[in-house]
């Protein structure tokens, strides 16, 4: 038996890692063998007595043996001796390396070493007493890693598993758009990252149930799981997560054709802390799975989103009856659910915690069902209705009257609603009203006499309603005297004279104004806006208003003392306009966009640099008269400012 120490010299990318092991490990291949049945325990072959060597060389047979032995020694020097060890022995060696930095260095040596290192569980690493604090820190799990496309491979996942343990532990992992990740990579993540709390998988067809099973075995702290476009994952993988990850609080399933009712039932049994569920375009999910989930988790489930599912009125009735803890509910594209289902959901009066409801492309939303929802959801504050063609003025007015807590109403592509319904809704206590692409909202022949003031409304948005013109605008001006945020976007039918009554009647002072793509507005409306509301205005968007010129910027510089965000993209602004703007002594502008202003040139350089003393964002895209040298100068001098060019 040989005593002493055997030294392994291991080549790696950044230096030399030296590991000492007892020489009495019964591994004769790990020590130098002379060829004369004697163990050589150290030193050089040429440090022996020269006389003895010469005498050995005297015999031809001895010389041949020495040459063979010397050749073997050279070969052993060229190939690190530790490579002859089986993976099992390397595993035992590597798990006794407590330093995270050293483990990362070992993983860089070769693919084989990376494979062995990635199979070492975090719990199996032998820590010295002095490293107890380091061990605790490594399990915090606050690091985030995102692998996309070609970068998402098993090798990368193995590297993440080894490397993150040395820097706080992996908490969030996202893998997107790859078909090169398999069970091998996720096994490494599972064993090396028990602190994983968030896992997101998007468009990874090569990931199957085996990967989720491996994650479920080790990552018991998992709280959020997102699975999207993963056809190889089925109920089996979801069930494994449900069985072993009781802390799961958020689950998203999208376009997973092999996940159905069985998986949702497993989640209902095994995840008592689930607070958020989103299911989209999963054809095998039906009433049975949704009903089980809602009824079993009625006391904890707060956010529910169901989109493009084959569920019927039964599921909606279950939501209405058992959804006592739901605060946010989104129902999108439910083509097989009818009026009875939405009526039952509201009439059950179980949604007493609901504060936000989104309904999009659901033909079952009618005047009758909308009225029931308003009466049954006493604490509803935010409502979004989009592409619900069977909702008319009558249903909208009855809904806003019944929903006494309603504050924010968003109507989009609801063509059955006209100006009458909008005005009726304003009689409630709304604070924010948004109307987008509602073709039924058109000007009346004359102004209505019913002009009861809506003193609660603070924000009004009318966007891309082609029939909306000055008559409507005048009515809103009389209704809404306390507006602070005003967006009139894409309305070609309004002019300066139509907008002036609104500006004049806003007693609270406008703070944010968006008039983008209102092609018939001119400098006059900007002058009126600046002179009336310059003391409160902070954000002004005039993008696409082609009749706005330098005179508008002169008024802004003179009156708008608090303005910090200005967008005059695609307007008729020249270098002179920027000159006026830069002369605003009290102007504290932070964001400026002049994108597409083709008349701005290099002459604006001193004005842009002067404005740059306060700017943090500047957009000069498609300003073709600005040279690349000026852009380089601006980038160099305005180092605090993010410049788009």
Image (tube, grey):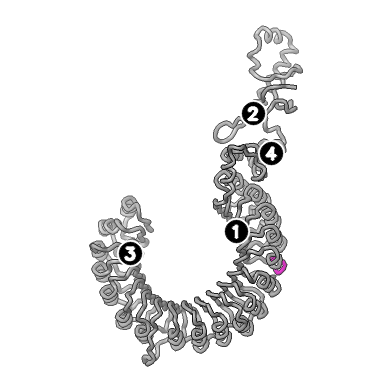
Q: Which mark is residue 466?
A: none
Q: Which mark is residue 91?
A: 4
Q: Give the extent of the magenta segment.
A: 259-263
Q: Name the residue located 33 percent from the left edge and 74 percent from the top edge.
A: 510
Return the residue nearer the eye: 145 or 643.
Answer: 145
**Residue underneath mark 1:** 200
What is the chief secondary structure element of the magenta stretch?
Answer: helix
- Please state, as top left, top right, bottom left or bottom right, where the N terminus lies in the image: top right
**Residue underneath mark 3:** 564
**Residue underneath mark 2:** 20
Q: Earlier in the sequence, mark 2 or mark 3?
A: 2
Q: CA distance from mark 1 to mark 4?
A: 30 Å
Asked if the stretch drawn in magenta spans residue 260, the answer is yes
> Tags 2 and 4 in contact by the CB under 8 Å rule?
no
**231 relative to 601 in the view: left or right:** right
Q: Name the residue located 26 percent from the left edge and 57 percent from the top edge.
A: 610
Label 4 sits on a secondary structure element that is: helix
**280 relative to 64 in the view: left or right:** left
- Decide: few, some or many residues near mark 2? Use Cα within 10 Å; few <14, some 14-19, many ≥20: few
Return the residue nearer the eye: 301 or 29.
Answer: 301
- Decide: few, some or many residues near mark 4? Use Cα within 10 Å; few <14, some 14-19, many ≥20: some
Residue 538: x percent and y percent? 33, 68
Is any part of residue 258 visible from this angle? no
Query: From the viewer's perspective, is residue 461 above or below residue 227?
Result: below
Asked if the stretch drawn in magenta spans residue 51, the answer is no
């Amino acid at each position: 038996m040989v005593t002493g120490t055997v030294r392994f010299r291991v080549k790696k990318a950044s230096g030399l890692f030296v590991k000492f092991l007892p020489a009495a490990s019964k591994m004769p291949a790990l020590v130098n063998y002379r060829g004369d049945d004697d163990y050589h325990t150290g030193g050089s072959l040429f440090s022996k007595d020269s006389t003895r060597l010469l005498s050995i060389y005297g015999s031809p047979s001895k010389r041949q043996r020495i040459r063979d032995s010397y050749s073997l020694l050279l070969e052993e020097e060229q190939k690190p001796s530790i490579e002859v060890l089986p993976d099992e022995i390397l595993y035992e060696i590597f798990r006794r390396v407590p330093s995270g930095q050293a483990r990362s260095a070992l993983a860089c040596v070769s693919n084989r070493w990376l494979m062995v290192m990635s199979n070492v569980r975090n719990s199996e690493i032998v820590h010295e007493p002095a490293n107890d604090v380091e061990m605790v820190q490594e399990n915090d799990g606050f690091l985030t890693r995102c692998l996309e496309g070609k970068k998402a491979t098993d090798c990368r996942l193995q590297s993440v598993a080894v490397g993150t343990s040395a820097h706080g532990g992996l908490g969030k992992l996202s893998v997107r758009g790859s078909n090169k990740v398999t069970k091998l990579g996720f096994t490494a993540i599972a064993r090396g990252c028990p602190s994983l709390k968030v896992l997101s998988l998007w468009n990874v067809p090569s990931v199957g149930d085996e990967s989720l099973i491996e994650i479920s075995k080790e990552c018991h702290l998992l709280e959020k799981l997102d699975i999207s476009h993963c056809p190889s994952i089925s109920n089996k993988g979801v069930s494994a997560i449900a069985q072993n990850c009781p802390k799961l609080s958020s689950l998203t399933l999208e376009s997973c054709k092999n996940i159905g009712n069985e998986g949702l039932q497993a989640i209902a049994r095994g995840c008592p802390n689930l607070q958020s569920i989103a299911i989209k375009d999963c054809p095998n999910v039906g009433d049975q799975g949704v009903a089980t989930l809602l009824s079993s988790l009625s006391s904890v489930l707060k956010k529910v989103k169901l989109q493009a599912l084959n569920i019927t009125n039964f599921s909606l009735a279950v939501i209405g009856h058992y959804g006592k803890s739901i605060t946010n509910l989104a129902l999108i594209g439910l083509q097989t659910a009818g009026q009875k289902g939405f009526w039952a959901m509201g009439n059950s009066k179980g949604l007493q915690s609901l504060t936000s409801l989104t309904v999009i492309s659901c033909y079952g939303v009618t005047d009758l069902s909308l009225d029931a929802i308003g009466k049954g959801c006493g604490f509803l504050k935010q409502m979004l209705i989009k592409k619900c063609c069977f909702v008319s003025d009558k249903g909208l007015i009855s809904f806003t009257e019944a929903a006494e807590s309603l504050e924010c109403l968003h109507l989009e592509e609801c063509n059955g609603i006209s100006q009458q319904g909008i005005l009726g809704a304003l009689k409630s206590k709304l604070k924010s009203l948004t109307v987008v692409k509602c073709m039924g909202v058109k000007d009346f022949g004359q102004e209505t006499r019913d002009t009861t003031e809506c003193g609660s409304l603070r924000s009004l948005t009318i966007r891309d309603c082609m029939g909306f013109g000055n008559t409507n605008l005048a009515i809103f001006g009389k209704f809404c005297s306390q507006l602070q945020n005003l967006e009139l976007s894409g309305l070609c039918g309004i002019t300066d004279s139509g907008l002036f009554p609104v500006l004049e009647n806003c007693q609270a002072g406008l703070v944010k104004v968006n008039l983008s793509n209102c092609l018939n507005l001119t400098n006059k409306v900007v002058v009126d806006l600046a002179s009336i509301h310059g003391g409160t205005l902070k954000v002004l968007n005039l993008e696409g208003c082609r009749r706005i010129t330098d005179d508008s910027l002169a008024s802004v510089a003179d009156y708008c003392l608090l303005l910090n965000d200005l967008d005059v993209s695609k307007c008729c602004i020249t270098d002179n306009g920027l000159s006026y703007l830069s002369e605003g002594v009290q102007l504290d502008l932070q964001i400026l966009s002049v994108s597409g202003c083709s008349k701005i040139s290099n002459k604006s350089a001193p004005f842009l640099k002067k404005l740059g003393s306060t700017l943090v964002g500047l957009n000069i895209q498609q300003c073709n008269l600005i040279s690349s040298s000026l852009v380089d100068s601006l980038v160099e001098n305005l180092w605090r400012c993010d410049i788009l060019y």
